[in-house]
Image (tube, coloured by chain):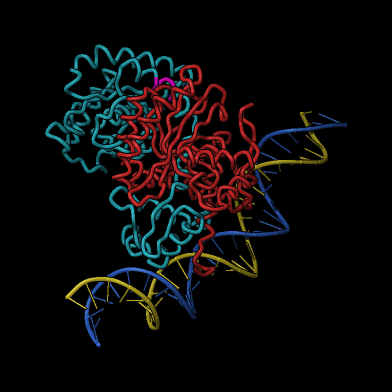
Chain colours: A red, B cyan, C yellow, D blue
DNA sequence: TGATTTTTGTTCGTATATCGCACAAACTGT
DNA sequence: ACAGTTTGTGCGATATACGAACAAAAATCA
């Protein structure tokens, strides 16, 4: 790939889209410029381009993204077989356990939800396909990190801001690596109120026909409702069934 | 806005992302070129850019989108207050009715799902935030088209491929406009097996504090399970409650 | 209020990177 | 081996990005 095979204008435009987020839904040209580090003139051109294409709305002062942006994410969700394949399994798992079930993959140091069957809302944050959580303190993140070969998990953890969301959160790299070893040995990960108080979840890897881990599957519940022993005793066997069924159809 | 305020490289890149879809998950350079109408060299540069940024994977022959693309759609979902505001209301509505409930907005001649609380899977297609349906044969589409002023609904219908998905589908523009008038008068829309056999749904507009329609809300069910009279008699009152509650918090 | 400062948005000339074309190379299947 | 197809490359013409300077709008303060 040569130098000229990279369209920097495209890359900059994508950065501009990602500048919008929960804390920053309405942005001025200068806002985008400071967030992305682009020149004001360039940020303006990107924003006007988005606006002209219908991906953004401009009221003369602030820009907001429009629902058209969802086309982009949806291009992935509909193009990738995994979300569509796992969804019915997820629905059944969620019904059988009475809890929310999700499937996610790793992107950098975050897990990305690609499918979800929600039962009741137990979290303060609203999870849906596309949502991201830091891998180090999420059950699916632990599972996915545990399957990485060699030093990769360590490398990823070193690029992560390991902050203590609760008093239970593991934030020490060596402790986390020990826990990953533990996850590898027992074949599942439990995260007990490390992400948010009152929240417990259990995750296992989803393994394709060729033996490689393609995603992680989890069931999340409220601590007041479900004991840790019940998660392993009652949820894990059902999750194993889902895992086995999916093993045959994945990849 | 001047001519030079448009970054065509960015616009082309976005077209390339949207070239991927359910029927086209793996694309070669030439595939993308023919789908988007871009020059092969340009398509290649866009794809290599996506690949370099981690939005796509390249195996030397085919490109596939990666989960990173979800960041883009998620930028909208997390940046826009509407999905987050309506989600808990949707959850309660879904629980109260025992059916799937959704909220969508209009984008061109399609409705775009921006939030959903699924109970059981009643459709052959898997709906999630970002999913699109043609407006003319979806209950939320009818509601949203009905609120458009003047000739706009007609204009949109004229740009739509009005195909009969089932024997019940309305495909005549005049008939559809009559139905929209009907929807305006009764304040809700029912679509009975026009999108898919066995599928019924009822929708109402979501109105903001300033009186403008900001989205549509629906409940979908299976025809075998719920009679039309029950949808109006049992679901509609609960939906009206949701509508009233949301009226106070929207916009 | 009005002057002054600061911030924000827009314009412009120029250096530079991208585009599209035409051609070359690599594959594919017969 | 060969025709057909797909992918990679070089180059001139053209469009874009940069940075700074300018204009406009807020914000601050006398």
Residue A128 is a magenta residue:
no
Q: Nearer the viewer, residue A69 or B157?
A: A69
Asked if residue A241 lies left or right of residue A180, the reply is left
Q: Is residue A91 visible?
A: yes
- At horizontal 17% and vertical 38% (from top left) the residue drawn is B165
Quadrant housing residue A240? top left
- Percent from the top left, x then y, of residue A226? 46, 20
Q: Residue at x 37, y 28 (%)?
A: B116
* Relative side of B155 to A108, left or right: left
Query: Does residue B75 show up?
Result: no
Q: Position of residue C11 (x, y in %)?
A: 61, 55
Query: Looking at this view, is A32 or C5 the one in front?
Result: A32
Instruction: Report the residue that reaches farthest toward the left.
Output: B167
B27 lies left or right of B86: left
Q: Is residue B90 within the magenta segment? A: yes
| Prevailing SS of the magenta stretch | helix
For residue A216, above or below residue B203: below
Q: Nearer the viewer, residue A174 or A135?
A: A174
Residue B241: x, y in percent? 37, 13
Determine whether A45 is above or below D24 in the image.
Answer: below
Residue at the image point whose x is 35% and y is 41% from the top: A83
The stretch in magenta equals B87-91
């Amino acid at each position: 790939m040569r130098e000229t095979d990279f369209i920097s204008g495209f890359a900059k435009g994508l950065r501009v889209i990602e500048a919008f987020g929960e804390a920053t839904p309405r942005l001025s040209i200068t806002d985008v410029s400071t967030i992305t580090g682009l020149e004001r003139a360039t940020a303006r051109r990107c924003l006007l381009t988005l606006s002209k294409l219908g991906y953004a709305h401009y009221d003369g002062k602030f820009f907001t993204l429009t629902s058209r942006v969802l086309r982009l994410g949806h291009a992935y969700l509909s193009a990738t077989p995994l979300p569509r394949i796992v969804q019915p399994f997820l629905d059944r798992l969620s019904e059988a356990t009475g809890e929310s079930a999700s499937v996610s993959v790793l992107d950098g140091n975050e897990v990305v939800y690609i499918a979800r069957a929600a039962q009741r809302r137990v979290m303060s944050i609203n999870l849906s396909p596309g949502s991201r959580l830091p891998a180090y303190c999420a059950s699916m993140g632990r599972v996915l990190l545990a399957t990485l070969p060699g030093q990769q998990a360590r490398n990823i953890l070193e690029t992560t801001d390991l902050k203590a969301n609760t008093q239970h959160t593991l934030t020490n790299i060596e402790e986390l690596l020990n826990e990953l070893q533990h996850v590898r040995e027992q074949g599942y990960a439990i995260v007990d109120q490390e992400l948010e108080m009152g929240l417990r979840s259990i995750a296992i890897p989803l393994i394709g026909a060729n033996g490689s881990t393609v995603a992680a599957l989890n069931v999340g519940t409220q601590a007041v409702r479900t004991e840790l022993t019940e998660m392993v005793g009652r949820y894990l066997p059902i999750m194993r069934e889902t895992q086995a069924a999916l093993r045959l159809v994945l990849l």
